[in-house]
Image: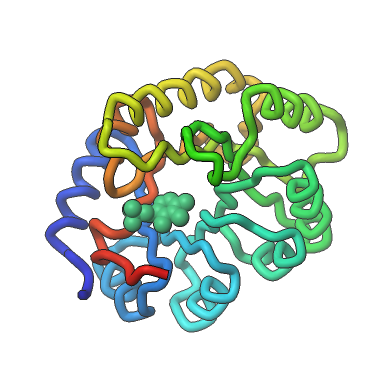
Amino acid sequence: MSVNKEAYLRIAGELNQNGVSLVAVSKTKPESDIRSLYDMGHRDFGENYVQEMLGKAAALPPDIRWHFIGHLQTNKVKLIIPFVQLIHGVDSLKLLKEIRKEAAKTGRVVDCLLQVHIAREETKFGFDEKELAGILEEYRSPGWEPVCIRGLMGMASFTDDMSVVRGEFRFLKQLFDRHRSSLSGKNGPAILSMGMSSDYRVAMEEGSTMVRIGSLLFGERAQK
Ligand SMILES: *Cc1c(COP(=O)(O)O)cnc(C)c1O
């Protein structure tokens, strides 16, 4: 299946009206699909495998803003640091320190979001409330100049029960508001990355500033 241009225009319009930005999640999809949205003016694309993102970034126009939305391994950090727009899923202090180290080498200030575990599932990565406070405390100490923590990211439970999803997003928004003063403002306004194809409307209603949408734009992905 190729890109659903009608869905793109409708969703982009809806988000735009609400001041929410759109990361088009192109993981597993061919470069031609990214090119289609690019030709419609879209620039923000999300990938969750490092090698795949590197390949696509090398083949596609340099003004694409690449968002890394997957689970990032520390040994892969250096590969994406030179060009990544925003790392959404920072889920350990070790990873944050690696990003700092590699960013310092390039002279870039790399934008990051801290991933918070809000879902019921055990398997989703992210900090709990207490760990988040700890990381932000650490971030207030000197030496973090190469890193800009712009905000938070979360994934809701995989369920059709939207009241559960809404509750989780609401909780994340509360954390976001509570910690806003600790988030760096040097690279722009704070970012709350929540909402995917199945729940982006709920996320928007609960205060998301950035949604990550794949299948509604590019069609279903083949099962891994
Ligand atoms: C795949 C993915 C998405 C997009 O999922 P869809 O349901 O296809 O919109 C969003 N966020 C993350 C972290 C993902 O891995």
Pinpoint residue 72: horizontal percent, then vertical percent: 64, 58
Image spot of residue 178 (x, y percent): 57, 16
Q: Quadrant of residue 183?
A: top right
Q: Name the residue located 55 percent from the left edge and 46 percent from the top edge.
A: 123
Does 167 sit left or right of 202 as displayed? right
The one of 19 and 158 positioned closer to us in this rendering: 158
Colouring mode (rainbow / by chain / secondary structure / one colour): rainbow
Residue 209 against residue 25 in the figure, above or below: above
Side of 11 relative to 186 (left or right): left
Q: Nearer the viewer, residue 99 or 187?
A: 99
Which image quarter has ligand 1? bottom left
Between residue 160 and residue 54, name the one nearer to us.
160
Instruction: Locate residue 15 relative to residue 83 in the image: left or right.
Output: left
For residue 45, above or below residue 159: below
Coordinates of residue 11 in the picture (x, y in percent): 21, 48
Q: Quadrant of the N terminus?
A: bottom left
User: What residue is drawn where x is 77% and y is 32%?
Assistant: 139
Q: Point out the residue furthest to the left here.
A: 6
Q: Quadrant of residue 105?
A: bottom right
Q: How many marks?
A: 0
Q: Which residue shows up at 42% across the image and 37% down it? A: 156
For this orientation, the residue located farthest to the front is 122
Nearer to me, 43 or 152: 152
Q: Which image quadrant for residue 36?
A: bottom left
Vertical placement of 207 versus 62: above or below? above
Residue shown at 45% from the left, 59% from the top? 46
